[in-house]
Amino acid sequence: MYTERNTPNKFRICLVQTTSDKQGREHNLKRAAEAVKAAAAGGAILVVFPEMYIAGYEAGERLRSVCETADGPSFETMAKFATENRINVIYGYPESRNGKIYNSANLIDSEGRLKGTYAKTRLFEGEKENFTPGSGYPVFDTDIGRIGMLICYDIEFPEPARRLAVKGADLIVCIAANMAPFHRLHARFSLIRAVENSVPVAYCNFTGNDDKFEYTGRSGLYEPSVELLSSPVDDMDKEILDERLIFAEMDHANYKREGTAYDYITQISPGERKMYQL
């Protein structure tokens, strides 16, 4: 099997570019079961779902009724999928914590353990009415290296990704619900963040339409060597907007070869480094 060749330095990931569905947790978990199984069968050791996948991005008035704790029902089910398929899983959901609601992402390892939770720090427009912003940028140790997570609007600012890079992230995963008319924006930002931080960026976005938004797809894995390792993003063609699984090979040695990418992180002064580690 391909999974036997996955190592911390070279492994396969799967980005689940799917629709934002508001039919409920059980429905979306059922869809997730199929995607996780297919991702593992395709040799992936990490499978990623978009922002707010569990509830659907535009939860609206349903939000309080669909939010849950980090270790709630969705985690229990996703952990089962991870264990059964020996795969790491990242997914977005509305998190309930200390009486507040966060736009969060969970990282589950291949043994079904909750490695960590990240809460979106940069809230976009109407999100500010429903969510509390997160306050930190944790990096989590996994069997495929150190992973940092961002959510959608976070990728449009240089500081979040830089903080993850300075803290030693080997891979930055950004889950999103990016919509029209910002078609090409996140593809550009994902590439820039990868290059300026010397860290690959895996970007997973919704596609299709819901009651309010048209989502813009363009999921992909971006390397610091200015390469996109999955699919084209420059044209509004069918391939980048399809609902589908996107596989990509993550090979750290590929961009660490001399001359393929400049390591900007080594140029950060001690004072700046201390600031970014907060």
Image: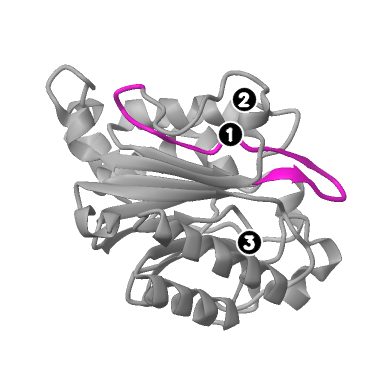
Residue at disc 1, secondary structure? loop
Can you tell which mark lies on residue 20?
none
* Residue type, numbered disc 1: Arg
Residue that label 1 marks: 218
Disc on the earlier residue, 1 or 2: 2
Disc on the earlier residue, 3 or 2: 3
| Residue at the (24%, 44%) spot, across then down | 274
> Which numbered mark, 3 or 2, is in the foreground of this view?
2
Disc on the earlier residue, 1 or 3: 3
> Which numbered mark, 1 or 3, is in the foreground of this view?
1
> Which numbered mark, 1 or 2, is in the foreground of this view?
1
Q: Position of residue 239 (x, y in %)?
A: 62, 31
Left or right: 251 in relation to 129: left
Query: Whole-Å distance between the Cαs marked 1 and 2?
Result: 8 Å
**Quarter of the image holding residue 101?**
bottom right
Instruction: Say whether residue 128 is magenta.
Output: no
Q: In this picture, which residue range is highlighted in magenta?
A: 206-226
Query: Whole-Å distance between the Cαs marked 3 and 2?
Result: 27 Å
Quadrant location, the N terminus:
bottom left
| Residue at the (38%, 77%) spot, across then down | 83
**Of 138 and 182, the residue lying toward us:** 182
Residue that label 3 marks: 132
Q: Position of residue 57 (x, y in %)?
A: 72, 55
Can you tell which mark lies on residue 184?
2
Q: Position of residue 139 (x, y in %)?
A: 32, 56
